[in-house]
């Protein structure tokens, strides 16, 4: 499988996947809110998902908050108890970069896009240090991989290539935002209709941040320029987290504020061609858990 990603605009990247065979389908992995350096990060699950992606050459997209990064001197939320011993260093931010790059080195070639979340922008604001660009540079030096750095929101186009017939396949257009707002009761689902209006051109809208997980399938009637109506689907995917703050003895801020357990993992999206419409890409989300 050959995967190639290039930048189309400051906020858009385009991944092409060389496909082969008749019943072609290939997954991509959408994942956010790893909070990798947190003591609550389920690194075993994260490694399992990345190993699976590596085995099948699935393009991986990180949609913000890879880092937790809250234990620096400049952060009011820092707590000695929440600091991993290996990060107990005067150069805390360097330690964060080193530890992440050590972990991500085997996967550097399958990571296509790496977007920032509010945890990374908060480090940038208070410590004037961009964790993601430091990691991308370091991983490039270690492996030669060129990971595309992405903003808080942006677009990921994915197109299968190498089909048997000659028709050009239009890429699937995935729009993402790391996310915003709460959603204690609604689990963020009220954002679906807002986002559907904001991003009518997206085949799929992905968002993280609130540590919830759902997909919603929005059917739409569309109109071709020849006056022929047709239907399509806009998927809305809420990516969960790898951070489990609920586990433990039932004490701490998470429990004092009445927070519930959170779904862990990410979402695979199988990319295939629509039945009966061989030049349209079909997206089929399924949970990575
Ligand atoms: Fe976030």
Image (tube, rainbow, N blue to C red):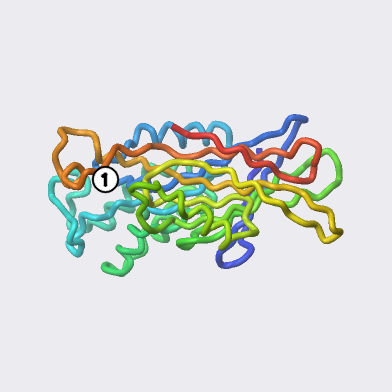
Camera-side residue of 117 and 52: 117
Camera-side residue of 235 and 83: 235
What percent of the width, then of the height, locates residue 266? 45, 40
What percent of the width, then of the height, locates residue 272? 69, 38
Q: Which residue shows up at 68% across the image and 41% down it?
A: 282
Q: Which residue shows up at 19% across the image and 42% down it?
A: 255
User: Relative to 260, does residue 181 appear above or below in the rendering?
Assistant: below
What percent of the width, then of the height, locates residue 208? 43, 50
User: Could you tell me how many numbered marks the image carries?
Assistant: 1
Q: Which residue shows up at 52% across the image and 44% down it?
A: 60
Circle 1: is it few (<14), some (14-19), or many (20+) Cα within 10 Å? many
Could you tell me which quadrant the N terminus lies in? top right
Is 186 on the left or on the right of 273, as rendered? left
Could you tell me which quadrant the C terminus lies in? top left
Is 284 on the left or on the right of 239, as rendered? right
**Residue 250 occupies quadrant:** top left
What percent of the width, then of the height, locates residue 89? 18, 53
Q: Secondary structure at mark 1?
A: loop
Taking the image as four quarters, which one is ligand 1 found in? bottom left
Q: Which residue is mark 1?
A: 38
Camera-side residue of 267 and 68: 267
Camera-side residue of 39 and 265: 265
Q: Which residue shows up at 84% across the image and 54% down it?
A: 228
């Amino acid at each position: 499988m050959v995967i190639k990603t290039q930048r189309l605009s400051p906020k858009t990247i385009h991944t092409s996947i060389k496909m082969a065979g008749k019943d072609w389908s290939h997954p991509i992995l959408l994942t956010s809110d790893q909070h990798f350096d947190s003591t609550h990060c389920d690194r075993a699950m994260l490694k399992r998902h990345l190993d699976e992606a590596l085995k099948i050459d699935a393009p991986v997209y990180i949609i913000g908050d890879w880092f937790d990064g809250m234990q620096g001197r400049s952060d009011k939320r820092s707590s000695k108890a929440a600091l991993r011993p290996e990060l107990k260093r005067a150069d805390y931010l360097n330690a964060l970069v080193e530890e992440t790059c050590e972990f991500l080195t085997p996967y550097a070639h399958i990571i296509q896009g790496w977007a920032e979340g509010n945890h990374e922008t908060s480090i940038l604001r208070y410590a004037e240090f961009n964790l993601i660009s430091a990691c991308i540079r370091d991983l490039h030096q270690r492996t030669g991989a060129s990971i595309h750095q992405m903003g808080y929101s942006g677009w990921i186009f994915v197109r299968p290539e190498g089909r048997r017939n000659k028709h050009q396949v239009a890429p699937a257009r995935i729009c993402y935002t790391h996310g915003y707002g709460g959603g204690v009761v609604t689990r963020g689902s009220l954002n679906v209709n807002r986002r559907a209006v904001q991003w009518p051109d997206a085949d799929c809208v992905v968002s993280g941040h609130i540590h919830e997980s759902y997909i919603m399938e929005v059917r739409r009637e569309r109109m071709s320029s020849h006056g022929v109506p047709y239907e399509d689907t806009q998927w809305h995917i809420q990516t969960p987290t790898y951070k489990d703050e609920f586990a433990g003895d039932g004490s701490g801020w998470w429990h004092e504020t009445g927070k519930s357990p959170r779904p862990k993992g990410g979402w695979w999206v199988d990319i295939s061609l629509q039945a009966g419409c061989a030049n349209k890409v079909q997206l089929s989300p399924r949970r990575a858990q």
